[in-house]
Each structure stands twice: as structure tokens, then as C-alpha cells.
């Protein structure tokens, strides 16, 4: 009778050990599935949308109203009133970029430190893990942590191009690049948020005028444009 009890107890221990091993494997597999789940992708997508909207709003409301475009864009007209040339002063643009970068950085940090701001209240439902639109809104919410990484990159890009019949369109936009870290429990990644905020859009009569930009090294007529150039004024395009 005593032997039978000892044998039964040994079998119980084996079952417990086997159960623990299976539980560990199950947790490991679930964790691997979670790490490959669309949760972080969904969090990045939502973070990109809200951060880009807030960046554009901050620039439009706090930066653009304080910029005097007449200092960076000058138009020369003929006697008949038709614009003959457009002059972009790169020196003034570089001064503006330097000042504007700090303003945008400070504004974003203020938004980041404001606990009531939408950037600090982003959430995603756990149902997203099932990767099915039907379940996207199910389950409790997971908080998304969004933090700025590094400095804000700012540039001003301009263009003059044909618009309709015998008209030209002048566009000047503020371009920004901000890198954020997106984090949810057990996962984190980075996103690069790029925005283009209009600074000046103007339609002028006549064909495309001569296009100059003037900097410290003299003036250049209709300079070539390279999308890979940096914030030294070379992003100004023909």
C-alpha cells in the first residue's frame, strides 16, 4: 500500500514538470507571435498621423504668421505689370531656417511635455493583435509612448512652374523631418515624420519668369535642383 502511494506521487511530479514545460513553451510561442504582431505597425501608423498633424498645426499657427516672405522672395515686374523674375535670397533663408528650427523644436517639446496633449494620450486596442478589421476595436487599450529623438531638421523649398494658360505658380513650403521613438509594452521602434507646410502659394500672370537665388557667393540663374541636397539653400528648385 505504501509503495503504491510513492509511485502515484512520482507520477504527479512528472505531470507537474511536464505541465510547466508546456506552459513555458506556450508563453514563448505567444510572445514570439506578439513580437511579430501588427501592434507596433499600427502604433507607428497612428503615431505618424497624429504627430504630422500636430507639427503642421504648430508651424501654421506659431511659425508661419511671424515670417515676412518679402524678405526671402522678391518679384521684379515689367512695365506692363507681368512678373519678369523671381529672386530668392538664400542668405535670408538660412537665417530663417536657423531661427525656425529652434522654434519648431521648442514647440514640439512643449507638446510632448503637455500631459493633456493628444500625443501623450495615444492608445491602441489589444484586438489589433488579431490582424482583422472586425476585432480592431476589441479589448483593453494599450498606451503608446511617443518621444522625440535628436534634433528637428528644417528646410525651405521653393518652385516656379507653369500653371494653366499663360500663368505661373510660385510655391514656398517649410519642410521638416522629426524622428520619434514609438514604444508599447515589450516593443519599440522609430519613425521619421516628414511634413511640408505651405508658406507662400501665389499665381502670377505670364509664362515662367527667370528664377534667381542670391546667397553669400553671388547670384545664380535657374539653378539645378537635387533632392538629396541639404539645408544650404540648394533645395530651392527651378
Image (spheres, grey):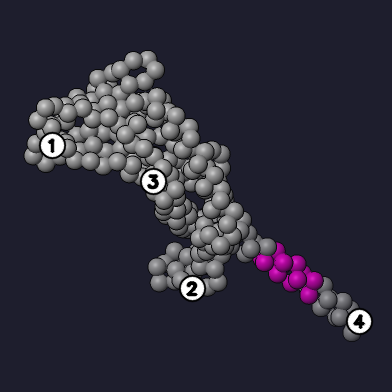
- Tell whether 170 sits left or right of 17: left
Q: Residue 205, which numbered label?
A: 1
Give how far across and how far down residue 58 sits, in percent.
45, 50
Give how far across and how far down residue 9 sits, in percent.
83, 76
| Residue 20 forms part of the magenta stretch | yes
How far apart marks 4 and 2 lie (CA) works out to 54 Å
**Does residue 187 appear in this view?**
no
How far apart marks 3 and 1 lie (CA) works out to 26 Å
Mark 3 or 4: the one toward you: 3
| Mark 3 vs 4, N-terminal side | 4
| Mark 3 vs 2, N-terminal side | 3
- The image quadrant of residue 235 is top left
| Mark 1 vs 4, N-terminal side | 4
Q: Determine whether the residue tagged by mark 1 lies in a helix, strand or loop.
A: strand
Mark 3 or 2: the one toward you: 3
| Mark 4 vs 2, N-terminal side | 4
Q: Determine whether the residue tagged by mark 4 lies in a helix, strand or loop.
A: helix
Residue at x-position 80% and y-position 71%:
13
Q: Residue 138, which numbered label?
A: 2
- Relative height, residue 137 to residue 189 (above, below): below
Q: Residue 2, which numbered label?
A: 4
Q: Determine whether the residue tagged by mark 3 lies in a helix, strand or loop.
A: helix
- Relative height, residue 191 to residue 213 (above, below): below
What segment carries the magenta color? 12-23
How far apart marks 1 and 2 lie (CA) works out to 56 Å
Residue at x-position 47% and y-position 65%:
128
Give how far across and how far down residue 42 sits, in percent.
46, 58
Residue lying furthest bottom in this view?
A: 1
Q: Residue 65, which numbered label?
A: 3
Amino acid at each position: 500500500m505504501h509503495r503504491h502511494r510513492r509511485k502515484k506521487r512520482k507520477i504527479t511530479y512528472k505531470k507537474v514538470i511536464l505541465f510547466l514545460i508546456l506552459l513555458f513553451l506556450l508563453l514563448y510561442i505567444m510572445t514570439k507571435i506578439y513580437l511579430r504582431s501588427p501592434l507596433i505597425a499600427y502604433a507607428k501608423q497612428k503615431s505618424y498621423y497624429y504627430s504630422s498633424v500636430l507639427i503642421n498645426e504648430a508651424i501654421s499657427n506659431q511659425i508661419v504668421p511671424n515670417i515676412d516672405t518679402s524678405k526671402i522672395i522678391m518679384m521684379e515686374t515689367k512695365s506692363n505689370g507681368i512678373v519678369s523674375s523671381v529672386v530668392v535670397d538664400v542668405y535670408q533663408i538660412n537665417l530663417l531656417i536657423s531661427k525656425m528650427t529652434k522654434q519648431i523644436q521648442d514647440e514640439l517639446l512643449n507638446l510632448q511635455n503637455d500631459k493633456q496633449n493628444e500625443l501623450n494620450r495615444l492608445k491602441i486596442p489589444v484586438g489589433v493583435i488579431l490582424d482583422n478589421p472586425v476585432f480592431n476595436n476589441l479589448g483593453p487599450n494599450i498606451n503608446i509612448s511617443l518621444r522625440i529623438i535628436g534634433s528637428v531638421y528644417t528646410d525651405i523649398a521653393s518652385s516656379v512652374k507653369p500653371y494653366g494658360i499663360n500663368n505661373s505658380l510660385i510655391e514656398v513650403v517649410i519642410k521638416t523631418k522629426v524622428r520619434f521613438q514609438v514604444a508599447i509594452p515589450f516593443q519599440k521602434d522609430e519613425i521619421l515624420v516628414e511634413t511640408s507646410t505651405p508658406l507662400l502659394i501665389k499665381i502670377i500672370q505670364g509664362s515662367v519668369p527667370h528664377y534667381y537665388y542670391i546667397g553669400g557667393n553671388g547670384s545664380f540663374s535657374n539653378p539645378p535642383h537635387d533632392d538629396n541636397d541639404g539645408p544650404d539653400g540648394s533645395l530651392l528648385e527651378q
